[in-house]
Amino acid sequence: MPDHPAVALSDQDVLRALADLRLRYVERLPGIMADLRRDHAALRGADASAPAVEAFHRGLHSLAGTAGTMGLKAVSEQARLLERAVQTWASTPGVGASEARLADWARRIDALDALTQQEGAAALAPERAADEASCPPEVTTASQPENAAPASPVEGDPVAREPAARVGVVVDAMGDAGELCALLEEQGYRVRELTRNGLSSAGWETGEDHGPELVVWLARLPDDAAQSEGPIARLARSPGGARRPVVVVLDNDDLSVRLTLSQAGVTRTLPRPLDPVRLVEALDAITGRMRQAPYRVLLVDDDSMQLEAQALVLRHAGMEVRTLERPLDTPGVLKSFRPDVLLLDVYMPGVTGPELAAALREREEHLYLPILFLSAETDMTQQLLALNLGGDDFLVKPVRPDHLVAAVSARARRARRAATLRQQLQTTLYEREREHQALGEHANVSVLDATGVVTYANQRFCRTSGFSREELVGSRFSLLRSDHHDAAFYDEILERVSIGGVWHGEMAAQRKDGTLYWVETTITPFMDARGHVYQYVVIQTDITHIKAAERALRQSEERLNFLVSSSPVTIYTRPVRRIAELAYVSPNLPQITGWSQEAMTVPPDFWLTLIHPDDLARVQQELPLVLAQGSHELEFRLRRPDGEYRWMHDQRLLVRDALGQPKEVIGYWMDITGRKHIEDELQHFNQALEQRVSEQIRSVIDSERLARATLDAMSAGVL
């Protein structure tokens, strides 16, 4: 069971090998004819179901196929005629071979023997053999097809990039494909963007500028896009007459549009919205940058000559081929070799090709393996039977090498694409299953039928609701309804989901013990082909703790608002970098200043316009001091909407973050007008008191002076 890697052979190497194979086969013909005579002699007295009949038929079948492959047309045709006669007789079980029939077959074997000697002698003639070495008849080599795998990929790496190609991107306006061009450049392509109107000046269509090696058309399709002299057709003709690949991105993915563009020379069309990954894959495939591993082919045939000839042709096309003469070993070889295509002969000892195909199809790992029958069988009924038992195609020997390569390449290419899609689907399925498991651990998941009856509930749903799965499944989902919502709430949900809409919102549900719990709910309907809902998937996240926290927060905010509204101060915050602006003021601002929150903060420095002109310069000068000192306070007069000025005490504090950097300034304003009035009155009182005291003191002093003068006068005897 030889296993040869894909090695590129020259045409002359293949021709010489096929010629040598043909000569070796001719040398074996006498032995083959002797085996036929022996099998024919064993038919005497045997019925149509005897093993001897199968051996005789298989020998004729092999001769017809291999002789045709080796270019011995006359031998192949006569062997095929005799094979059909034997097959017709063998299709009637229980009927023995008559002497007349055996005699007729003997004469035809003699004639066949004479033909083999005649063609064999011609093939062995020295002058004929020399000619055969350069080009043996009916054994033309097949060049590698356009889409065949390359002969020599990088060893151990099925993906090897070639140097990047020049890509021209045609757009309606420059810059339309900026992100796409950047992506293509990241993938190694050299990209040039050009508008549709700029094509003629660029010279791409006329050959003045050799332009890109391939074109991606993103622009709106012109009316003459599909015409033979339209812009796309001209782009597809590169200088020198070669074809330039053109990929067109379509808004209308209609089949007729794609066919028309294909006839105009477009290589590939892609639908919009454009998937950039698909575009890169298409460009890689077109330019050959992305090499793939050679196609792997397993050939199963009991005729070693046939195997060798077919393997030689397929290897020349760059494929990796393994041959097998024992068909019962096929399952094991499939497991180790993992071919892209399996080629089976129809008639083999021990098991037929269709029987083997049917057995392989019973195993899931071989369901998608392309199986081609390669046989000299020309009976359409037998061919259809073989295909019905698990085959994908039937090739009749002799098969032209180019036809064989094309058929195998096409099947292998589709098989690989299908395998890629299956792998993507399996990956997606695995990811969805993991997501489902994660969702099941995180959320309450249930499935309802069209009538609202629960058909599935996950374990988390059971734990949250307090019901067992047995209690939930088969019950209506309304079992969990609470009195927190009115009937209109549930009617609105039903109205939306019954027409295919997804409902998302919060609802209160009731546990088995009667307590309420809150869930954030998404209800997704699933529609059948007629647009009718056949099930709902309900995903719920328990938010009871969030609702409790929200309730506590509301209560706290209410208490805070009450305290703030009752407080004699209004609180504010200022950004550090814009110290003169107010970022926030507390809701009780109108009570303190008469101005609304919005009026005071839009614009954020509006409050400065309300400061008394005599205080403004001082306030502006002292505002930044809080950044240097950490805290600061000042007093100023602020004008109310009615024009009255009220005195404000401004106390502010610098708040720092965890790293000690200034974060914001917080402060408060307190109306101190009353205090200021008291201070003014006290000042006036003090001034009056000081004046009266001063007057009293002056009066006392004056009295003392008068008394002293009187005493002095009395002492002097004046009085």
Image: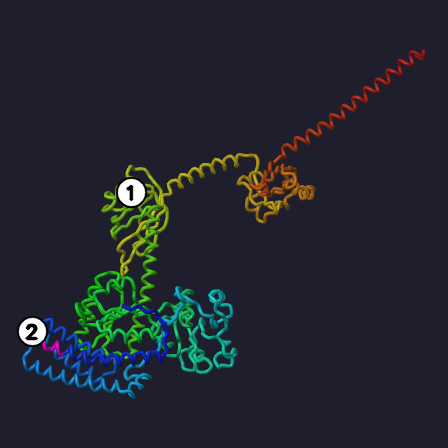
User: Crowding near pointer 2: few (<14 within 10 Å), some, many (20+)?
Assistant: some
Q: Is residue 422 left or right of residue 635?
A: left
Q: Position of residue 244 (x, y in %)?
A: 43, 77
Which residue is nearer to you in this view: 181 or 32?
A: 32
Residue 235: which quarter of the image? bottom left
From the top left corner, tell me how far across and down residue 398 is, in percent.
24, 79
Q: Label 2 amino acid?
A: Asp
Q: What percent of the width, then of the height, locates residue 697?
A: 79, 21
Along the line of sight, which residue is nearer the eye, 208 or 325? 325
Along the line of sight, the residue nearer the viewer: 657 or 124: 124
Secondary element at image label 2: loop
Q: Which residue is mark 1?
A: 462
Whether residue 703 is visible, yes or no, is: yes
| SS state under label 1 | helix
Residue at 59%, 45% in the rendered image: 575
Q: Quadrant of the C terminus?
A: top right
Residue 517 lies left or right of residue 373; in this view the side is: right
- Residue at point 43% right, 74% down? 221
Indicate the quadrant where residue 518 lies. top left
Quarter of the image with the N terminus is: bottom left
41 inside magenta stretch: yes
Q: Which residues are magenta?
A: 37-45
The reply to whether discs 1 and 2 touch (Cβ–Cβ < 8 Å) is no
